[in-house]
Image: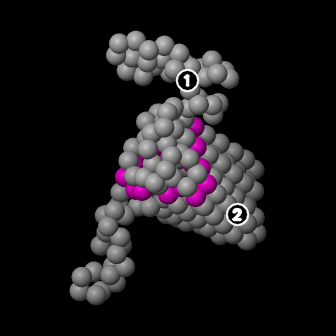
Amino acid sequence: MNVRIHTTAEVSDKASIGDGTSIWHQCQIREGVTIGEKCILGRGVYVDAGVSIGNHVKIQNYVSVYHGVTIEDGVFIGPHVCFTNDMRPRAINPDGSIKAADDWELSLTKVRRGAALGANSTIRCGVTIGEWAMVGAGSVVTRDVPDYGLILGNPAKLFGYVCPCGEKLLTKKKLPGETILSCPKCNFELKLV
């Protein structure tokens, strides 16, 4: 198997790493993690127990991917993106005792094929980011993002749609009940109903 793991990375022997994947300086990969083929995990990436990462995923420096997150094939995650996994986080219970693993409720998050998450964005748990969607840098995602959706801001709002090539889609034709969007670069078309 052709896997590159930097000597400063901590990779659990109970993690599964796909062929051609590179794990760089000071990464931590926990037990039960599955990482697909030909992925790149930059410096300081943390991948929590049980996380699933598809093939051809690029995760930039200092990203935290917590338990409950699934990342599909071809996803780009910019530097310092942070995922969450608990809607009501607390360090202690009302009686002052420290919370144990079974004292919280896991919320699942899914990032679908080809999506791109801009630097410093925060992804609130329990959302799905659609195929080929694009999240602008610094955005705070608090609800589901549609396929090809372009979202920006805090909280993130829909500002249009993007092509798989990354260009913003423009309105080509507007009919009653549907709109056809087109890419000015590659002529990809998307029908919205």
- From this view, report whether residue 87 is shown above or below residue 36: below
Relative vertical location of residue 112 with respect to residue 174 in this rendering, above or below: below
Residue at 51%, 64% in the rendered image? 48
Q: State the CA–CA distance, disc 1 to disc 2.
A: 37 Å
Which one is in front in this view, the residue at disc 1 or the one at disc 2? 1
Q: Is residue 60 left or right of residue 120?
A: right
| Sooner in the amino-acid sequence: mark 1 or mark 2 | 2
Q: Which residue is mark 1?
A: 170
Q: Name the spot of residue 14 as percent of width and height, x first.
A: 56, 63
Q: Is residue 51 visible?
A: no
Say whether marks 1 and 2 touch (CB < 8 Å).
Answer: no
Neighbor class of circle 1 (other Cα within 10 Å; few <14, some 14-19, many 20+) is some
The span picked out in magenta is 111-131
Compared with 51, 88 (above or below) is below
Residue under the point 51% across and 38% down: 150
Q: Position of residue 128 (x, y in %)?
A: 42, 44
- Residue 127 in the image, given as x and y percentages of width and height: 39, 48
Q: What residue is rendered at 64% in x and 57% in y?
A: 79
Q: Amino acid at mark 1?
A: Leu
Measuring from the top left, give residue 9's x and y in whole percent: 69, 68
- Secondary element at tag 1: strand
Report the label total: 2
Query: Residue drawn at (39%, 17%), measured in percent from left and top?
Result: 178
Q: Within 10 Å of the Cα at label 2, are there few (<14), some (14-19), or many (20+) other Cα atoms?
A: many
95 drawn magenta: no
- For residue 193, which numbered disc appears in the image? none
Task: Determine which of the numbered discs, if any, sits on residue 43 in the image.
Answer: 2
